[in-house]
Every structure is written in C-alpha cells, then in structure tokens.
Amino acid sequence: MENSTISIPGAVPEGYTASGSLIVRVYTARGGIPIEGALVTISYADASAPAPHAVLTTDKSGRTPTISLAAPPRSLSLTPEDTSVYPRLLPYALYNISIAREGFYTLNDINVRIFAGITAIQDADLIPRAEELPREYYLDDSVFIDQTEEDGL
C-alpha cells in the first residue's frame, strides 16, 4: 500500500483550523484475518452535517488509505480550559465510522476522536453472519461502539 494521504474537500465545522489523520484497519477472527473490500464511511459526529464525509475501501491488508480530517487546533489540547478563542470547542474532532462488508454485520463506531497533528489508527473487528441464528436475534444487523465515555487518558 502506498503512503499517500487522502484529503477530502468540503464544509468544515467552525473552529476546525487544523487536521489530523485516520487509518481504519478491518479484520475478523479477533484481528487474525484482514478483510479486503470493506466499505468504510466516515462522517462528522455532529448531526448538522449528516452527509458522509468520505467513503473508503480497505485493501488486501484490511487497511484504508490514510485520510486527512479536519480538527480543532492543537493548542486546545494543550490548554483545554481556555475557551476564550473557541467557546465550547473540544480539543478533538468527533467522527462516526460505519464499516460494511457482505457476509458480516455492519459495525458503527461512533464518536471516534481525531486530534490535530496525530494519526489515529482505528481497529475494527467484524462479526461474520451466522445464517443459522434467527434474524431478530441481532435486531437491525448492526453492532454499535460508542466511544463517548471518558477513558481516563
């Protein structure tokens, strides 16, 4: 895979004057088998921007190309209590990632944090569909991971 960064033009939320990067790695079997051809849809977590920001496809190693994403300035992560410049702006951007591949349940990873100047690597472990289980057992065929909770970092 080449070391290129994809930059997607489009509307950027107010105060997002910097950028961070994201690589999504998609596997199954608890990280043992990479999944080629998975569709990775990235969108802003803010409901005011519901359209997808980017749609990428994984390569044979299960990785997307590196994508550049808008983020608040790095200075906010150094002094997060200073809200005089951008009131109520978090020191990171929040994005939602949806990963779909035929034969697997769709994975929705919400509130993924992107910091300015940092390349985030988001691992996703897709669950194969088990045809013998009743469909209603899995509700809407999706798995959700909410990263809103503070993790003590």
Image (cartoon, grey):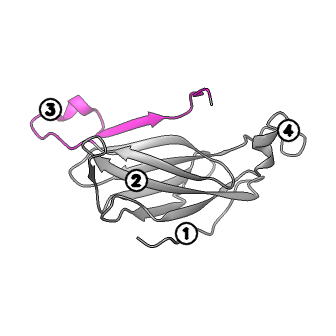
Q: Give the residue type at disc 3.
A: Pro
Q: Give the residue type at disc 4.
A: Thr
* Helix, strand or loop status at disc 1: strand
Residue 134: give its label.
3
Mark 1 or 3, closer to the camera: 1
Range of magenta residues: 127-152
Earlier in the chain: of badge 1 and badge 3, it is 1
Side of 1 relative to 131 (left or right): right
Total numbered circles: 4
Mark 2 surroundings within 10 Å by alpha-carbon count, few (fewer than 14), some (14 through 19), many (20 or more): many
Earlier in the chain: of badge 2 and badge 3, it is 2
Mark 3 or 4, closer to the camera: 4
Residue 4 in picture, x, y percent from top left:
52, 72
Q: CA distance from mark 4 to mark 1?
A: 31 Å
Q: Quickly name the residue at label 1.
A: 5
Mark 2 or 3, closer to the camera: 2
Q: CA distance from mark 1 to mark 3?
A: 42 Å
* Helix, strand or loop status at disc 3: loop
Q: CA distance from mark 3 to mark 4?
A: 51 Å
Residue 115 in picture, x, y percent from top left:
66, 48
